[in-house]
Image (tube, helix red, strand yellow):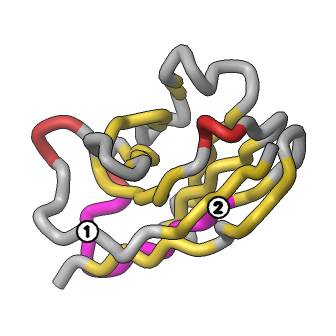
Amino acid sequence: QVQLVESGGGLVQAGGSLRLSCTTSGTRFSIDNMGWYRQAPGKRRTLVATITTAGFTTYADSVKTRFAISRDNVKNMVYLQMNSLKPEDTAVYYCNAVGLRVYDSWGQGTQVTVSS
């Protein structure tokens, strides 16, 4: 059974930093490209960062140069380092696989709130 547990969110002032973590179990982590998604109030969930099994990364334009995704293939974990946070980064953040291999089960997410 797939389980995804996100943590590390919180309330931070604009310009601050947070590091999100995602613990996975029951997945095919070693062969899945992973990503971080976010959903702001009243908006659809969007993909903000991806990382392949080999460590290649991509980012949405809105977070490029500010966010960094990484993974630990031993611990089956994914991380998102978020710097220079802006109020528009406020959202619930989720991790999951990407593309056609997205897992049906989603975690509860972790709330990130950036105050101006």
Q: Position of residue 13 (x, y in %)?
A: 86, 51
Q: Is residue 62 above or below residue 115?
A: above
Amino acid type at image mark 1: Trp
Question: Residue 79 appears in which quarter of the rendering?
Answer: bottom right
Instruction: Tell whether 8 sits left or right of 78.
Output: right
| In this rendering, position of residue 78 left or right of residue 102 | right
Farthest residue, direction top: 61
Q: Is residue 27 magenta?
A: yes
From the top left corner, tell me how far across and down residue 82 is, in percent.
Answer: 73, 44
Position of the N terminus by quadrant = bottom left
Report helix, strand or loop for mark 1. Answer: loop
Above or below: residue 63 compared with residue 42:
above
Q: Amino acid at mark 2?
A: Leu
State the separation of the CA atoms marked 1 and 2.
16 Å
The percent position of residue 97, horizontal first and vertical second, equals 29, 50
Q: Quadrant of the C terminus?
A: top right
Residue 104 pos. (x, y %): 11, 64
Q: Residue at x 19, y 36 (%)?
A: 99
Magenta segment includes 40: no
Instruction: Say which of 41 and 62 sits in front.
Output: 41
Dominant SS of magenta comes to strand
Bounds of the magenta segment: 20-29
**Which mark identifies residue 20?**
2
Q: Secondary structure at mark 2?
A: strand
Q: Which mark is residue 106?
A: 1
The numbered mark, 1 or 2, whose residue comes first in the sequence reads 2
At 77% from the left edge and 51% from the top edge, which residue is drawn?
Answer: 115
- Residue depicted at x 81% and y 58%: 12
